[in-house]
């Protein structure tokens, strides 16, 4: 059984007991969160597709930790002009573990 759920603007394919890195959620470490924007549920071959979300379907997850992702370097240059710019970025992430997929 798996589901496709939208979390913080991104879509993820999740199964039970899977750990996922998502954009920073506004929840404390160790807290349980409930994700209700489930787009698709596959229950052993029986597929339910939402319009846009599956009615009554929810994902329960636990927040494991808050962390920062790897550094991404952004380098800009214009040739023969002497222009160079280097920026770095680290995305704030939250690691969650999927507890259960609840059908309605």
Image: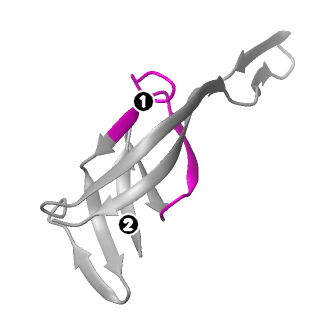
- The x, y position of residue 34, in whole percent, is 30, 43
81 to the left or right of 46: right
Magenta residue span? 16-33
Q: Residue furthest top?
A: 82
Q: Is 31 within the magenta?
A: yes
Label 1, label 2: how many angstroms apart (C-alpha)? 21 Å
Which residue is located at x 33 percent, y 53 percent?
A: 59
* Disc 1 target residue: 31
Q: Position of residue 29 (x, y in %)?
A: 51, 25
Residue assigned mark 2: 3
| Quarter of the N terminus within the rendering | bottom left
Q: Quadrant of the C terminus?
A: bottom left
Task: Specify the farthest residue to the bottom.
Answer: 45
Q: Residue at x 40, y 24 (%)?
A: 27
Residue 41 appearing in the image: yes
How many other residues sit within 10 Å of disc 1, few (<14), some (14-19) or many (≥20)?
few
Q: Secondary structure at mark 1?
A: loop
SS of the residue under disc 2: strand
Q: Residue at x 64, y 25 (%)?
A: 67
Question: To which quarter of the image does residue 66 belong?
Answer: top right
Q: Earlier in the sequence, mark 1 or mark 2?
A: 2
């Amino acid at each position: 059984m798996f589901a496709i759920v939208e979390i913080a603007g991104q879509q993820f394919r999740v199964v039970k007991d899977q750990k996922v890195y998502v954009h920073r959620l506004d929840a404390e470490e160790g807290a349980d969160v409930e994700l209700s924007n489930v787009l698709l549920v596959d229950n052993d071959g029986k597929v339910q597709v939402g319009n846009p979300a599956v009615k009554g379907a929810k994902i329960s997850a636990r927040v494991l930790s808050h962390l920062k992702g790897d550094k991404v370097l952004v380098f800009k240059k214009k040739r023969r002009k002497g222009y160079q710019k280097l920026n770095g970025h680290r995305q704030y992430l939250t690691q969650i573990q999927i507890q259960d997929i609840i059908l309605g």
